[in-house]
Image: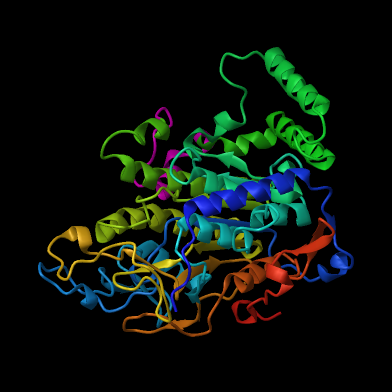
Amino acid sequence: MKTPDYSRRDFVKGLSAATLGALAAGYPRLASGAEASAAIPATADTVIVLWMGGGMAATETFDPKRYTAFEKGMNPNSVLSTFPSIPTSVDGIRFSEGLERLARVMDRGTLIRSYTAGDLGFILHSRHQYHWHTGYAPPQSVACPHIGAMISRTLGPKNPAVPAFINIGQRFDNGESEELKAFSTGGFLGSEFGPFNVAFPDAAKDVVTPPGGMSPARFENRDKFLRRLADASPVGQLGSGYQKESLIRSLDNAHRLLGSSAAKAFDLTLEKPEVVAKYVPGGWDFSRRLGGDQNREGSYEKANVQRFGLGCLLARRLAEAGARYIEVTTEYIPFLNWDTHEHGHEKLVHMKQAIDGAVSQLVLDLEERGMLDRTLIVLASEFSRDMMQEGKPDKPITNQVPVPEKIEELTHYGMHRHFTDAGCVLMFGGGLKRGHLHGLTADERPCKTIKDRVVIEDLHASIYQALGIAPNLSYEIEKRPFYVTRDGLGKPIRDLFRAG
């Protein structure tokens, strides 16, 4: 059965309606009985999500299949993996070549190979990213909070001076920017629970420093003026009374951070060069700026490797300082990074360089500091990719990428189509099992899930479980409950957690 198309314009229209609804919404109270439903033991205090935006091909990373080397004139249907597999520190679990350092820390991790993305019709990256980050398929009648905002609102800050929800590495001035902004918010929960955005981690200290050349008095006057403007605006112009109060509280939080010693956590120049080099191949000269490198022809891939590595280092520092939810992204930009509509094999060489050293070092550093057991690391993507299959085998979707009958050049060697029937989620710490594999996929195309399927509400329920939040906890908005997992139906995957 063919699923209906759903255009980008439809998505934006739905989001606009939900945003207006959020502005008009009143105070979102915990629904009756929600406090009791949240009383479960926590195994983690902090979550770090490492977001592989664009569709990370499982068969090229953490679920390798039969390797087929490139040959001119080869049949694309014969290509399952374009990299050989390598052993990991756990018998029976293999990764794709290029992930050697991550392979060595697999004995600290849990690997899900059976994550199945939602059936949302015609595949738009931003819709699936919205679905992953909120647990709800767009459009919705309310502005759904990002999972980081929900965690921030429910648990509160670990350190009052440090933003509870910090988003690292994603710019909002490129392709699909409005759609990305739509789920990167506090939604109806309010501005104070939305993300503190750091687009360029090498310049993170600038985000917590008044603009250069601006005197403290002038900065203070600007802050006072903005507060008066917000306070004097009629109800409805900046949203409901609650939304206005939430905006003021977000300003208070930002001001508290600027005057706190915790702001030093954002300053990566305080790290020793040899530490930086463990996260960033070749190290990094902080007199440079990644922002400029992004625009130089031919340098984007290298700059992206550097930015993600610095983002992981910043995440470690922020976790130490008391952030509650931190997300670091390889950055979603249409047709770049994991969004491999062409040159799939070549692009993944760079993407593996970006994540291999940085993620493995983050794991080791947290372990060395005694923080890994109480920090849950989640590496995930909106869906996987395949050479031939678009969507799911039993729910065909219109092919968005043409594949030639024969592959004559490297342009078409790699995983190009959106595959939603199986994908990987790699997790560390937070009370999860070590060296554990969950789920099984077919060895031949279509490489679909054949055991222990995982859907988003159950993955979210597992994350919430680790934090001591019940999957049926809800907030009352517009006189009805809004659950942290869809309709409160998420079920924690017990098999992921250590006994006791």
Please indicate whether residue 368 sits to the left or right of residue 397 in the image. right
Q: Is residue 33 shown left or right of residue 252?
A: right
Q: Nearer the viewer, residue 74 or 107?
A: 74
Residue for point 77% across, 23% down: 229
Residue at the image point whose x is 73% and y is 16% from the top = 221
Q: Is residue 386 left or right of residue 377?
A: left
Q: Which residues are magenta?
A: 269-288
Is 171 placed left or right of 239 in the picture?
A: left
Quadrant position of residue 468 = bottom right
Asked whether the viewer can see residue 9, the reply is: yes
Residue 185: horizontal and vertical position, in percent? 64, 47
Q: How is the image coloured?
A: rainbow
Percent position of residue 66, x then y: 27, 79
Residue 389 percent coordinates (x, y): 34, 73
In the picture, the quarter occupied by the N terminus is bottom left
Image position of 360 with respect to 392: above or below: above
Instruction: Name which quarter of the figure residue 343 lies in.
Output: bottom left
> Quadrant of the image for the C terminus?
bottom right
Q: Is residue 278 magenta?
A: yes
* Residue 370 seen from this side: no
